[in-house]
Amino acid sequence: MLVNRPRRLRANEQIRSLVRETQLSVNDLIYPIFLVEGTNIKEEIPTLPNNYHFSVDMLREEIEELIELGIKSVILFGVPNKKDEFGSEAYNENGIVQRGIKEIKKISKEILVVTDVCMCQYTDHGHCGIIEEGMVDNDSTLEYLAKIALSHAKVGADVIAPSDMMDGRVAAIRNILDKNRYHNIPIMSYSAKYASAFYGPFRAAAHSAPQFGDRKTYQMDPCNSDEAIREVELDIMEGADIVIIKPALSYMDIIRRIKDNFNVPIAAYNVSGEYAMIKAAAKAGLVDEKIIVKEMLTSIKRAGADIIITYFAKDLARWILEE
Ligand SMILES: [Zn+2]
């Protein structure tokens, strides 16, 4: 006689929804925004269909749309015109991200502004730090990252998100923020950021591909998992309030291990390659975009992510509203 019948709890949508363990919410989402110099620009990013390069003056409509959809958080990336060896536009008080933060705060106080802190979009060599003797030098980079973070805090950033993967940068940023009385600004650290091929479309969008070598001397080896635990542990010790795992899909095991080992909120970055692959497959008629995106984002949350940074944020918010 068959006694175990798990199918009883799958019999109809009512009972399925009653026992559903993981549910996506618009509260989980952070939407990435790319800022460019100039005025009157809203240009679709060819590698990231349905995502745009915005000049600061064109942000209003976008921000108002996000509020309408219930999305409360954005993460800003700057694409400056001027690049140099030291990425000096990154800490320019009138830089593209700094102006973007001020503009968003002017449009609405409801949006949480997270800022990506890195140098690769701002350096002429495209690396995430200062080059010394042909190598990215860790300790001299820290000073610059701290300066960038402070410049964001000064104009109203709500959360600082360092993505460079230098050792000690969370402490360096925490230190400079605290010294300047920004002790209430959280650090959301890209703690386990892998050297991944899934970043391809982003690099084209942010014009941040390295001009020589690769990022394997600072981003993590995709083969490693224990190392992610160590990175997260160090970042928490240095003062990280939230940790990011990036990318998401190929690193679900990492998300789960971090969830099981630590008690800080986890953000997963559903990266550009993950987005672009689905967009391409949907366009080719191979998959149902809505169903597959919901499945993907749900599985990221089920793996243990509390927060999802995703280019699908607006689509998902719309689908949730429709339900
Ligand atoms: Zn970088």
Image (cartoon, rainbow, N blue to C red):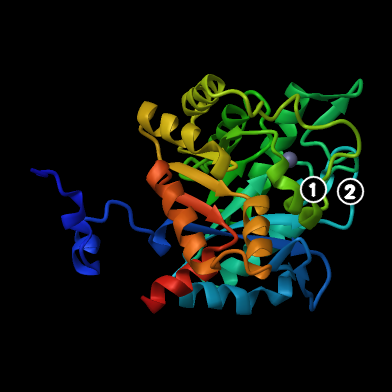
Sequence order check: which comes first, mark 2 or mark 1?
2
Q: Between tags 2 and 1, which lies in front? A: 1
Establish whether ligand 1 lies closer than 8 Å to the Cβ of label 1: yes
Let me know if residue 240 appears in the view: no
Task: Work out which quarter of the rendered image holds the N terminus and state it.
Answer: top left
Q: Secondary structure at mark 2?
A: loop
Quarter location, residue 119: top right
Quarter of the image where ligand 1 sits: top right
Q: Point out residue 244 in the picture as x, y percentages from the top left corner.
A: 53, 40
Q: Is residue 239 above or below residue 273?
A: above
Q: Position of residue 20 (x, y in %)?
A: 26, 56
Q: Is residue 286 above or below residue 214?
A: below
Q: Position of residue 3 (x, y in %)?
A: 9, 44
Picture disc at residue 289: none
In front of the other: 292 or 142: 292
The reply, left or right, for residue 149 in relation to residue 73 is right
Residue drawn at point x = 72 percent, y = 75 percent: 57
Q: Dot 1, crowdedness within 10 Å: few (<14), some or many (≥20)?
A: many
Q: CB under 8 Å between callouts 2 and 1?
A: yes
Q: Which residue is mark 1?
A: 121
Looking at the picture, tell me which residue is in the foreground, 247 or 72.
247
**Quadrant housing residue 248:** top right
In the displayed structure image, the side of residue 81 where residue 290 appears, left or right: left
| Element under disc 1 | loop
* Residue named by callout 2: 83
* Percent position of residue 81, x then y: 88, 58
Image point 79% across, 78% down: which residue? 40
> Quick one: which residue is furthest to the front in this view?
1
The C terminus - image quarter = bottom left
> Up-down: is 290 above or below 148?
below
Q: Amino acid at mark 2?
A: Lys
Residue type at mark 1?
Gln
